[in-house]
Every structure is written in structure tokens, then in C-alpha cells.
Amino acid sequence: MNENIPEWKTWLKYAEEDLNSAIALSETVERFPRNVCYLCQQSTEKAIKSIFIYQNIPFSKTHNLNLLYNNLPQECKLILRQKHENN
């Protein structure tokens, strides 16, 4: 990772790249649903882990989104819930 960029920003950049890749794949003729789902899961995982890194919260090496989400600070969960309800 580039030492001039904070680690959390790098993780967030990777999350955005995965999401953009999923969107691009979903717009192809074949659509590749398995790959799109995988990239969406990866994007979500990296975005959540970027929050942990930003807030100096230790986290386990897991791919379980429920476990990661449940370990988010309460204020983050409220923000995510509000954004979800507004979309």
C-alpha cells in the first residue's frame, strides 16, 4: 500500500473498485451473476473494514458480513440504516 495514503482510504478505494467492477459486469450481455455477487460482497467487506481501520477498532479476519456489521459502532449502523431508508 502507498504509505502516503492512509490505510483506511486504500481499503475504501478497493471497495469502490470492486463495486464499480460489479456494476460493469452486471451491464454485460452475460451478466455473470455469481461474479457480481462476489464483488458486491467483497466491496461491502472492504468498506466495513475501512471504518474499523479509520476508528482504530480491531477486527477479526473474517468474510462474514453479519459479524462485521454487528461489530460496527452504533453511530455507523444508524447512518447506514438512514441511508438505506432514504434510497
Image: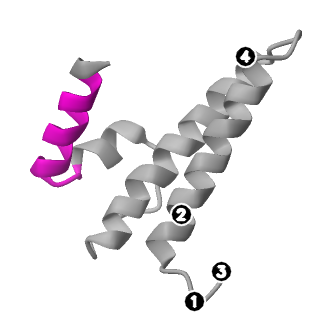
Pointer 2 residue:
11
Residue 62, above or below 65:
below
Give the side of residue 77 with respect to residue 23, left or right.
Answer: left
Amino acid under disc 2: Trp
Q: Residue furthest right?
A: 29
**Residue 1: which numbered mark, if any?**
3
Pointer 4 residue:
33
| Separation of marks 4 and 3 at Cα, in angstroms | 30 Å
Secondary structure beneath label 1? loop
**Residue 77: which numbered mark, if any?**
none
- Quarter placement of the N terminus: bottom right
| Separation of marks 3 and 1 at Cα, in angstroms | 9 Å
What residue do we see at 55% from left, 36% from top? 41
Mark 3 and 1 residues: CB-CB less than 8 Å, in contact? no
Q: Which x, y percent locates residue 50?
A: 42, 62
Q: Main secondary structure of the magenta part?
A: helix
Upstream in sequence: badge 2 or badge 3: 3
Give the side of residue 42 with respect to residue 32, left or right.
Answer: left
Upstream in sequence: badge 4 or badge 2: 2
Pointer 1 residue:
4
| Separation of marks 2 and 3 at Cα, in angstroms | 10 Å
Q: Which x, y percent locates residue 84?
A: 28, 24
Question: Which quarter of the picture shows residue 25?
Answer: top right
Mark 4 or mark 3: which is in front?
3
Amino acid under disc 1: Asn
Asked if the stretch drawn in magenta spans residue 72, the answer is yes
What residue do we see at 28% from left, 76% from top? 56
Secondary structure beneath label 3? loop
The residue segment tinted magenta is: 71-84
